[in-house]
Amino acid sequence: MFEILQKKKIAPLVDELTISAPYIAGHAKAGNFVVLRIHEKGERIPLTIADADRQQGTITLLFQKIGKTTVELGMLKPGDPIKDIAGPLGHATPVTKYGHCVLVGGGIGSATLYPILKALKDAENKTTVILGARTKELLVWEDKFREHSNEMLPTTDDGSSGRKGLVTEVLKEVIEREQVDLVIAVGPIRMMKAVSELTRPYKIKTIVSLNPVMVEGTGMCGACRVNIAGKTRFACADGPEFDGHEVDFHELENRLNFYKDEEGQALHLFIRKTKRKGMKLA
Ligand SMILES: Cc1cc2nc3c(=O)[nH]c(=O)nc-3n(C[C@H](O)[C@H](O)[C@H](O)COP(=O)(O)OP(=O)(O)OC[C@H]3O[C@@H](n4cnc5c(N)ncnc54)[C@H](O)[C@@H]3O)c2cc1C
Ligand code: FES
């Protein structure tokens, strides 16, 4: 059992949990994730280790409540246990001194970028962060990104914070302004695809973190298979980070939509059951 120590609402439909998990906190590296199961009958879901404190033995997870399990997770309170958390899983981000690294985050994908930013900074890279969201209040951990980066460029669809427009427009300006040695993009599939297409003609190394449906997270079930340069890879065991110029984003998007009906039904049933029991949804 893993105890929830703190819970914060950090944006509409986005919660932050600090959880006691000393082993995972002691071994987590930037880019790693966990697979958790709330209770015995719960579904397993992958979430990025957004932060880890070795001394306190805690990990921090940020999650968006979009379906049955994330809504159920959002109903837990400090003191509540989570049945299983397996991790750290996945390959860590390859961190070295690249030069100028531009990190592009969309929505909740920004959670993945925070430990990567800190690791790149420790390796003495210059960092520019471009965070994108529909509106200001959906920008995740803006202050923390500002604190650890050399340059922070928020971007919103409605212009309520930073530049109005798409993260790719800002990225193009940065690339045309100065040397960029590495781009890391994490967020919606369309955003990662657009970033990879933008950087391809400039021949800039581009890493994306893929988010297919996962089950056990250790390369045994095949649920998370992705097509990389025409070859099948498992995002959990071979990734989740891959060269953006080699990813078949179209196939990834199709596979993510495969269980949409069942996912909708599961959420609907959960909401009905919860209301019948007189419990409040978070
Ligand atoms: C390595 C990895 C790290 C992740 N890290 C985070 C994180 O830090 N924070 C976070 O909020 N989410 C993260 N995700 C996505 C998260 O796992 C899913 O949102 C979650 O499994 C949805 O479960 P659910 O039962 O609530 O929703 P479901 O009912 O399963 O799905 C609801 C909707 O979300 C979509 N969806 C389902 N699975 C995923 C997925 N893997 N990625 C994107 N959309 C999905 C479905 O197509 C559907 O439209 C990560 C995914 C991976 C693979
Ligand atoms: S989640 Fe089973 S192989 Fe990746």
Image (cartoon, rainbow, N blue to C red):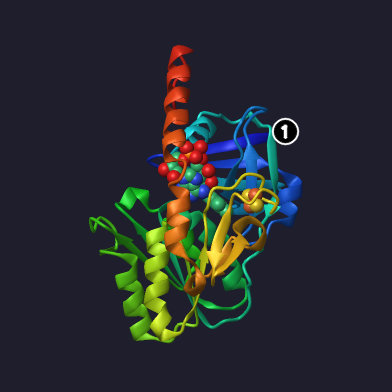
- Amino acid carrying label 1: it is Met
Q: Is residue 137 above or below residue 144?
A: above
Provide the secondary structure element on which disc 1 rests.
loop
Nearer-the-camera pick, 262 or 60: 262
Q: Is residue 152 visible?
A: no
Q: Is residue 102 visible?
A: yes
Residue at (47, 57) in percent of width and height: 252
**Residue topped by disc 1:** 1
Q: Is residue 180 above or below residue 87?
A: below
Q: Is residue 213 above or below residue 199?
A: above
Number of numbered discs overlaid on the protein picture: 1
Residue 241 x %, y %: 57, 65
8 with respect to 175 (left or right) = right
Nearer-the-camera pick, 6 or 177: 177
Nearer-the-camera pick, 199 or 133: 199
Q: Quadrant of residue 106?
A: bottom left
Q: Is mark 1 within 8 Å of ligand 1?
A: no
Residue at (43, 47) in percent of width and height: 257
- Local packing at callout 1 (Cα closer than 10 Å; few below 14, some 14-19, many 20+) is few
Position of the C terminus, as image quadrant, is top left
Residue 49 x %, y %: 60, 52
Residue 22 x %, y %: 74, 46
Residue 278 x %, y %: 45, 13
Residue at (42, 33) in percent of width and height: 264
Position of the N terminus, as image quadrant, is top right
Q: Is residue 238 above or below residue 38?
A: below
Q: Quadrant of residue 216?
A: top right
Residue at (33, 77) in percent of width and height: 172
